Amino acid sequence: MSKHRVSRRQFLSYTLTGVGGFMAAGMLMPMVRFAVDPVLKGEDTGDFIATPLKTTDINTEPQKVNFKFKQKDAWYESEETGTAWVFKNEAGEIVALSPVCKHLGCIVDWGTDKEHPEQFFCPCHYGRYEKDGTNVPGTPPLAPLDVYPTKEKDGFLYVGKAEPRKGA
């Protein structure tokens, strides 16, 4: 027998504290994992999304291209539709511009302003952009349109995640 005797009251106190601690940990761990798991998962950055546009069909006139991609918001995954204005510049390089106006997020369109048919036009607040996506001074947008990185694969155009124009 041990010289240190544990009373019944101490034994019950130790036992209930231990059992309560295990129960609390058992309930708390799934909640913590549920909250932290999406944060710890890696994001597929740098992935390119296929568009239905063949690179041979791209010319110097901007054309609207819709493409579908999967978007994941925490635990919810959905299929979204993105849009890009695609054309070849004077150097023959493919340019893909985001249609989202940098003023208030409206959607710009090519050649819809009768006074400026060779520019992108935002109907919300009469914002204008040059063909290369730079904003026209004196109009509401304060920054140029975002640019999609592009690449060609199997004859089709692939676009990456839209990025702000360098130097803007």
Image: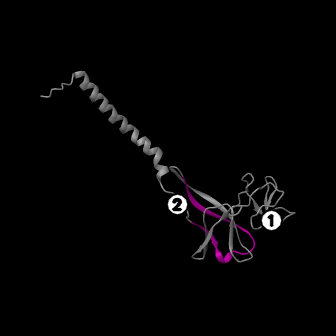
Q: Quadrant of the N terminus?
A: top left
Residue 123, x across and y down, in percent? 79, 55
Nearer-the-camera pick, 134 or 154? 134
Q: Is residue 10 magenta?
A: no
Q: Quadrant of the C terminus?
A: bottom right
Q: Which residues are magenta?
A: 48-72
Query: Residue 95: image x %, image y %?
Result: 69, 70
Per the image, is 56 magenta? yes
Position in image of residue 16 (x %, y %): 29, 28
Secondary element at image label 1: loop
* Residue under the point 32% across and 36% down: 22
The residue under the point 74% across, 74% down is: 60
Q: What residue is shown with label 2?
A: 44
Task: Tell me what residue is drawn at x 40 percent, y 42 percent.
Answer: 30
- Per the model, the C-alpha gap separating discs 2 and 1 is 34 Å
> Relative to residue 96, is residue 43 drawn left or right?
left
Q: Earlier in the sequence, mark 2 or mark 1?
A: 2
Q: Is the C-beta separation of discs 2 and 1 under 8 Å? A: no
Q: Label for residue 7?
A: none
